[in-house]
Amino acid sequence: MNLRVRVVTLVVTLVAALGGINGGEAGVAVRNMTLAEAVAHAAAVADVRLADLAVVDLRERVGLARGALLPTLSGEASVERRTVASFFGDGQTFGPFNSWDARLTLGQTLLDLAAWRRLDAARLDVDVATIDRHLTVERAAAIAATAWLRLARAQALAATAGDSLRLAEDLRAIADALVQAGAGEQLDAVRAATRVSAARGAVLLAENQAALAGVVLARAIDSDPAQALSPIGGLDTVPLRDDPAHGDAAAALARAGAQRGEFARWRAVLRARQRDRDALSAERLPSLRLEGDYGWNGPEADRLEAVWSAGVVLDVPLVDGFRLNAALASRDTVLAAERVRSRDAERRIAAEVRGAVLDLASARRVLAVANETAGLAGRELDLARERLGAGAAGNADVITAQQALQTAREQAVEARHGLAQALVLWAAAVGEAGSLGRVEPAAGAPASVPAPRSVEKP
């Protein structure tokens, strides 16, 4: 018994020392936050902002690709001193003489299928980036919801530990009173004191876990980790309204097919990569361009004459060193890889949806059993108290019943958290993570296990 007391005391001392590290933050105001607010804040985290910048960058690249089809205007001016050899090779030369030249050159693409297809591919890349941004928001929402649930669970377990500590303190007071009255044994008083010490250690550990969970939530919503966060309503605010698709894998798969952005992304990626290949293939085709210039030319700056030219340029590729053949083979490989990824992702999403449906059904059953167990444990503690009050037994039965109730209440909290987490995973699997927390709890939803009544002194 003495060894157990020393071990428990050591645990309490260590946890208290760890808790002192965070003691400087005691004066920080607590920021209350609902699940819906946590999910909404997730839409502005760094990953989402980076996705926004990626969309902006690709939109600028659309302008770059469009530039190949728009008119071009350039100006040029030069002064040269020339000596020209005779065309007949008789050694005669002309010059040296000056040549002043200034002109504006205008160009306009008339026909360039490769440029048009590159523009189409750039626009499709913007579509892909926009879908990626949506997927990033969904992932951030699921992460924030999971972190919020973790904090709600940690605070619920801390409250449960606090209730157990109060019960243990009541029981110790009863044991001490009986010893002082000569109606109890010293063993019962020591046993009750040991239980109080252990309960205090459990409270400290639970409070530290709640503080750590708050830091995780702050990181998930891109908030200051020094800001204390508290979930409004706790685990009971997670919407539990029955949805026909919760238990129907086929309906959930249909919803995922309509709402998961991955499906639209695969289609856009395949179209974009196919358009890239088409653009390369079109480089083998002739292109047509209108070019013209107008300017001034002469031997001296004060003896310039107006000159101009206009024409149509037909560019016909002939030999490119098999560059296009290699590039097309590379694009074919990229297309094949994207098709493999899309088929694999379809199976992955189907597995995620079916797994989420199974987890949700199991979590509901586990919660029902946990609530029943907690109710029976509470009844066991009531009976043990009655026996203690009647003098029919010592406090060993009460301590055992108290420990059983503590375990049952912790299991009920874990089961409630498991159901809430299963709902988050189900929402993420069907593409609804961004709407988490927007629905009020259904009437008759399972409530958290109530705190046990204090032990009444006989």
Image (cartoon, rainbow, N blue to C red):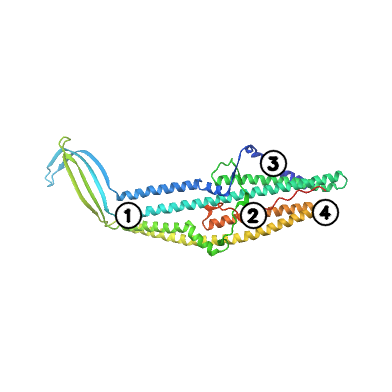
Report helix, strand or loop for mark 1: helix
| Type of the residue with mark 3 | Ala
Judged left or right of residue 266, residue 416 is: right
Q: Earlier in the sequence, mark 2 or mark 3?
A: 3
| Type of the residue with mark 1 | Trp
Expressed as whole percent of the image width and height from the top left, the position of residue 331 reads 38, 58
Question: Which residue in the protein does label 3 denote?
Answer: 16
Q: Are marks 4 and 1 in contact (CB under 8 Å)?
A: no
Question: Which residue in the protein does label 2 denote?
Answer: 416
Q: Earlier in the sequence, mark 4 or mark 1?
A: 1
Q: Are marks 2 and 1 in contact (CB under 8 Å)?
A: no
Q: Earlier in the sequence, mark 3 or mark 4?
A: 3
Mark 1 vs mark 3: give the one in front.
1
Question: Which residue in the protein does label 1 denote?
Answer: 116
| Type of the residue with mark 4 | Arg
Judged left or right of residue 72, residue 167 is: right
Question: Which residue in the protein does label 4 denote?
Answer: 387
Q: Are marks 2 and 3 in contact (CB under 8 Å)?
A: no
Q: Taking 224 as reference, is 436 above or below it?
A: below
